[in-house]
Amino acid sequence: MPRKVLVIEDDPSARRLLGYALKQEGYEVLLAPNGLDGLKKAFEGDPDLVILDVMLPGVDGFEVCCRLRADPRTEQLPILMLSAKGQQADKATGLKVGANDYMVKPAAPSDLISSVQSLLVQRVQGAARAIAFLGAKGGVGTSTVAVNVAIAISQRDKRVILVDLCPYSGTVAALLGLKPELTIAGLFADSTDAIDPHDLEEALITHDSGLRVLASAQTAAEYRGFSPSQSEALFNELRQMTDYIITDVSAYPSEAEAMALGKCHPIIVVTGSKADSLASASSAAALVDRLGIAQERLGTVVVDRDGLLPEAEPSKLKEVIESTTQIRLLAIIPYDTKAPFEFEARGTPVTLAEPDRPMALSLKGLADVIVDGDGLASGDRPAGSGA
Ligand SMILES: Nc1ncnc2c1ncn2[C@@H]1O[C@H](COP(=O)(O)OP(=O)(O)O)[C@@H](O)[C@H]1O
Ligand SMILES: [Mg+2]
């Protein structure tokens, strides 16, 4: 079956030319002369990719892009933005509102076609969803949440790779009782951007639960920073190997971690329940915004160190948390005194050790929200709130 490309472009001659070039390559083509018609055809015409002009009469390309990303039917649709606006800021806006690629007009039809092809290939190969857990500050429970959610998702018969992106202080391996011989540090030893898929396979440790883990350097001596393009190469490789990529990101992300954040949806900010922790969650949101990542991708998880939950009414708590952090609340994880002294000490996460404990149940609920919802359904009760 030919792949279907929707072209949203107001200039009739540019539209015709693009349509012609695509048909020559064997694509089926839908044409739309403005944003509203384009949206209708995107929702109803089931295209495989959209080429989207920015300057359109009425609803402009940035707005079209936002609306496509907000609708579950087109949330994942590859979007190639095409514009006469060549400014770096326009490109950043385009990528921020969710375009997968951005080309400046006039673009040679051959360049356009190759960009279309590569976006479609990425789409076929890159089915994995990437999810980030970002600590609002150190010690709030980010790695614990990431590890348990990764296990809970793998228990739903999904392939999951958990990647510890924290520098040498990463604790994912220890939480799982693993002693890695190979880590992420070894993958980029020769400082090229390319990743050898064979090396990557070898560096992945399979945990008893079925979860696969890419550990971070375990000591400062072993630590090697890596670049954003290396981080991107890693993601592209991982996307072909699994259903879910779960990343543990440190509270002060490096450039490589920032690149990874840009590829994740949702980005889940983990924080504590005290006022100062909630404030640091909003700083994390500001950081994400500075990286040019849309706030809609954010969700927050509160680890209830201060035991607010049994006292406060869940819906009130949700209101307070959301108004302080300005991020949608996905789950409240109860504090469990056995977590640090027993599960962590034994290297067996609570989800495996005692799946019926409230802490485990709320983490499983969070995994369900991630897998079943778009991860950010706003009207939902947060997992773990006794719903
Ligand atoms: N829900 C919880 N209840 C009790 N202790 C927890 C909980 N979550 C995490 N901890 C403990 O808090 C400490 C820090 O957790 P960790 O996940 O390493 O945080 P971070 O990754 O944010 O630095 C660990 O000792 C861990 O066992
Ligand atoms: Mg951690």
Image: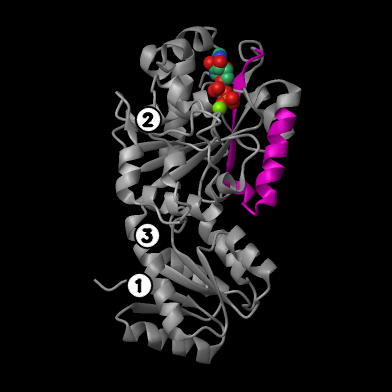
- Mark 3–mark 1 distance (CA, rounded to whole Å): 13 Å
Q: Which quadrant holds residue 41?
A: bottom left
Q: Is residue 309 above or below residue 68?
A: above
Q: Secondary structure at mark 2?
A: loop
Report if the beta carbon of the residue with label 2 is closer than 8 angstroms to ligand 2: no
Q: Does the magenta run of residues contain 294?
A: yes
Ligand 2, by image quadrant, is top right
Q: Residues within 10 Å of mark 1 (few under 14, many from 20)?
A: some
Give the percent coordinates (x, y) of residue 151.
Answer: 38, 27
Q: Is residue 222 magenta?
A: no
Foreground tag (3 vs 1)? 3
Q: Quadrant of residue 2?
A: bottom left
Disc assigned to residue 4? 1
> Is residue 47 placed above or below 371 in the rendered structure?
below
Residue name at image x 33 percent, y 45 percent: 199
Q: Position of residue 131 (x, y in %)?
A: 48, 41
> Which residue is located at x 64 percent, y 17 percent?
313
Category of crowding for the residue at label 3, using alpha-carbon neighbours closer than 10 angstroms: few (below 14), some (14–19), many (at least 20): some
Q: Which residue is mark 3?
A: 123
Q: Which residues are magenta?
A: 278-306
Colour mode of the rendering: one colour
Specify the label residue 181 is tagged with.
2
Indicate the quadrant containing the N terminus: top left, top right, bottom left or bottom right: bottom left
In this rendering, position of residue 323 left or right of residue 298: right
Q: Nearer the viewer, residue 17 or 108?
A: 108
Name the front one of labels 2 and 1.
Answer: 2
Q: Residue type at mark 2: give it.
A: Glu
